Image: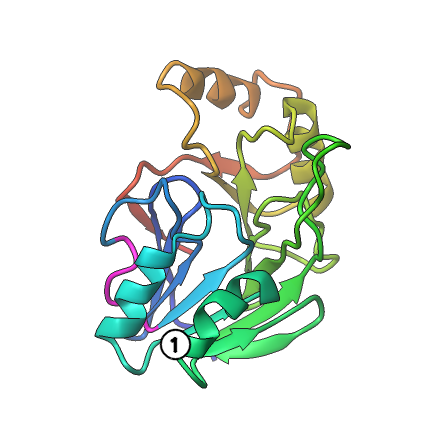
Amino acid sequence: MTEPATLLTKQGHACVRLYKEGRTLVIDPGGFTEPGAAHGADALLVTHEHPDHFDEGHLRAVLDTNPAAELWTLRAVADQLAPAYPGRVHTVGHGDRFEAAGFDVQVHGELHAVIHPDIPRVTNVGYLIDDSLFHPGDNLTVPGVPVETLLVPLQAPWSKFSEIVDYIREVAPRTVHDVHDGLLSDNAFPIYGRMLGPTGPGIGDAERRRLLPGESTTV
């Protein structure tokens, strides 16, 4: 039986919307995400507590508007919202598996990437959706299973370009989509495009695609 297609919509920075069979899952609506990006979500996932991934106002707006909406996230975020939404905020960690809005979700990873040795590391998890699409949050987590679509943190204070290339090579997805790009100017995107394209060092057989905020594709 053929799996139903999922519509992937890029939102600002690290946020994406996934739509399948009439239900919507939103990952990481943060401070750089457009107002309303999570509106209408049936389920929410948050990878970690940093404000570019976790905006309490975005989450409360969804949970207040839709009494059936639920949130899955790690303890640092869950503890801030669970008292106001009993039974609707779920704490997850590495190795967990659950269903959210009709999507199968597996949790991979435990810690945020090292920004600097003097900065304490917070917890961070990545989400593998329907055994196909992986959002790593803020670490270059390799889930250790086949990945069709990889959402790659294109730029961050904790990464460098060579690490991004090696990460894509190791995960070996069929398709790569940029996320975590909210700190880049328009001048940067053609450069990243060349470096991650056929004139760059090479990312294996993966096809890199860039969606602008609000643009969609099927995965």
What x and y, as percent, mark residue 62? 28, 67
The quadrant of the rendering that contains the C terminus is: bottom left
Q: Report the front residue among 142 and 203.
A: 142
Amino acid type at image mark 1: Ala
Q: Is residue 92 above or below residue 76?
A: below
Which residue is rendered at x = 60% and y = 44% of the image?
138
Q: Is residue 178 visible?
A: yes
Say left or right for 168 vs 83.
right
Color style of the picture: rainbow
SS at circle 1: helix
What x and y, as percent, mark residue 136? 59, 50
Which residue is rendered at x = 31% and y = 82% of the image?
68
Q: Is residue 156 above or below residue 130?
A: above
Residue 152 figure quarter: top right
Tell whether position 137 is magenta.
no
What x and y, as percent, mark residue 49? 53, 53
Residue 95 figure quarter: bottom right
Q: Report the front residue among 10 and 200.
A: 10
Residue marked by disc 1: 84
Say left or right for 155 vs 182.
right
Magenta-drawn segment = 37-42
- Residue count near mark 1 (Cα–Cα under 10 Å), binned few <14, some 14–19, many ≥20: few
Q: Is residue 102 visible?
A: no
What x and y, as percent, mark residue 21? 31, 75
Which residue is rendered at x = 66% and y = 50% of the image?
122
Say left or right for 7 vs 92.
left
